[in-house]
Every structure is written in C-alpha cells, then in structure tokens.
Image (tube, rainbow, N blue to C red):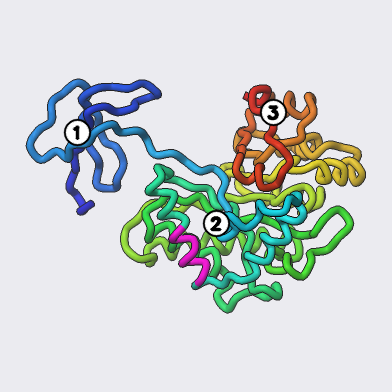
Amino acid sequence: MKPGITVTFWCARALIDGAPVDAVRVHAAPDGTIARLERGVPARAGDTVLGTVVPGMGDAHSHAFHRALRGRTQADGGDFWRWRERMYAAASALDPDLYYELASAVFAEMLVSGWTAVGEFHYMHHRQDGRPYPDAHAMELAVAAAARDTGIRLTLLDTCYLRGGADRPLADLQRRFGDGSAEAWLQRWSSLRDTLDTSARTLAGPGPAVTLGAAVHSVRAVPRSAMATILAGLPATVPLHIHLSEQPQENAECLAEYGLTPTSLLHELGALTPRLSVVHATHLTDDDVELLGAAGVTAVFCPTTEADLGDGIGPARRLA
C-alpha cells in the first residue's frame, strides 16, 4: 500500500464481531489497519470487490522449524520422547540462512491459509555447539526478517532454556538453546529488544510489526530460582508463554523436585497473570484448572502437535 493512500474494499458479506454483515465497505489506512467500516452500502467506483471476508486468525504458538517434521514422526508408534529426538535432529541442521528460507515458507503457508499473525516460540539462539554466532542475534533476526518479508505479524517469543530436566544439564543436541543462566538470558533478551528496535528500520521494505515477547520453555527446562529471576527482570507488559504439563513425566519430575504441580509452582512464583499463556495444558488437576481460571491465564492448545506427542488433548471445556 502506498503511503498516504486509503484503499477501500467492498465485501458482499463480512464477519464483524462474530456476526455476518452484508454489503460492507472497509477503509484501510496507509499502515494496513482498518480505519473505518460502512455497513449496508453499495460498492463504489474504485472499490476492490470481494465475496465473503473473515478476519485473519492468530497462531498463538508456533515452532516454524517443526514444519520439517511433517509426515516423519507418525510412523511406527512412539511417544513424546521419540518425537523429541527427531525434533532435535531437525533443529541441529539449521543456520540463519536456512532458517530464513524455512520460516519464510512456513509463514507464507500460514498466510494463504488465513493465519495473519503468529507467536513464534523461539529457542534456537546459538550455533550447534552452543557458541554465539558472530552476530549474536542472527537466528532471531532471520525469523523477524522472514516474517516482515512474507507479510505476517510476528510476536517473537524469545525463550529461556537452561537444562535438560530436573537433574540433567543440556544434552549436546540442546546446547544451542541455552544461555547458561537466567541472568545471561535476560541480558541477551534486552540486547535483542534494542537490536529489533534498530533493525526494524532496515529490514527489507515496509512490513507488519515485529513484537518481542518472552517465554520460559517449561518447568523441566528452567529451575524455580531462574524463573523467579526472569519474572523479576522482565518488563510487566511483555507477553510471556510457557509449555505447561505437556506430558506426565513433566508433572512427575516437578512433583519430585518441588512437591508441586507445574501450575502450582507457577502460582507460588506469582507467574499466573493475564499476560501468561500456557501451552498444551494437557495433564491438569482440578486445582490446576481453578488456579489458571482464577488468574485469567490463556491456554493455548496445539491439537496436531499433541497428536504427534500421543499424550491426548487437555481439558478444554473445563478451562473455558
């Protein structure tokens, strides 16, 4: 869209606030946002005439590189842990250039399917051996550039990932995910925020906004003390995501380490607030559901991924 020029679309029918409305003119502002709607009006000269129009959908939880796994993880049975090993192998093959190409293709596939915004849960920060790239944010900027160039709005959920489990350091295939400590992750997150603010003016051409969010991978991957540091160090307005109770072993390890369910641990830390999105939320107790609901937390389900994991789908109706 050219600067300063308002474009109008006439829709035979448009879904507005959940209800179908006939004969709608949409005035689009130069920045691509909707400036004004007219309802029940005829098309005018210069309008782009459309049929039935619905708002674009938002994908609240994406791992763009998982697209490379499609069709490769369902054969011969298996479980979450077999799936995870194949996922790590796919992750180890990526560098910034290849990730830009893959993410661009995935975001384009989203757009043509009606998804116009995406939250990318991103933890491939470093080189395969864990050393930073010469450009410390090369992987993050590759994802941001892919979104801008493709035309999808991106919330980049930069993820803290510190250990392989309650009593395990990061495995070799996980080393590129880690920053060593919560303090080091916060420093890199702050540097990334400054870099994105600057690079937004240099990424190719005008495009949708890139927003920086944050994520704690899971209670398996980030210990309680590190989560407390992160919660204290992040600005209160930053959206925060976490994988929660994704499979039974996560719950068992959390109970063994802390005597709490993952949800109860987050409650104890003060993490349950409306800015938090919990992903999967598959294996919850009744008390967990009550805590999440009382705090106004958002639950994000990923049915296709959960089918791959073979662990079922969470209590959607009770959470709603």
Residue 96, image x, y percentages: 53, 71
Q: Secondary structure at mark 2?
A: helix
Between the residue at mark 3 and the residue at mark 2, the CA separation in whole angstroms equals 26 Å
Q: Secondary structure at mark 3?
A: loop
Give the mark nearer the N terminus: 1 vs 3: 1
Name the residue carrying label 3. Answer: 315
Disc ID at residue 67? 2
Callout 2 environment at 10 Å: few (<14), some (14 to 19), or many (20+)?
some
Callout 1 environment at 10 Å: few (<14), some (14 to 19), or many (20+)?
many
Residue 182, image x, y percentages: 73, 58
Left or right relative to 287: residue 293: left
- Viewer-proximal residue among 283 and 77: 77
Left or right relative to 197: residue 252: right
Q: Amino acid at mark 2?
A: Arg
- Viewer-proximal residue among 172 and 162: 172
- In the displayed structure, 218 sits above or below 319; it is below
Labels 3, 2: front one: 2
Residue 102 on the magenta span: yes
Q: Secondary structure at mark 1?
A: strand
Name the residue carrying label 1. Answer: 10
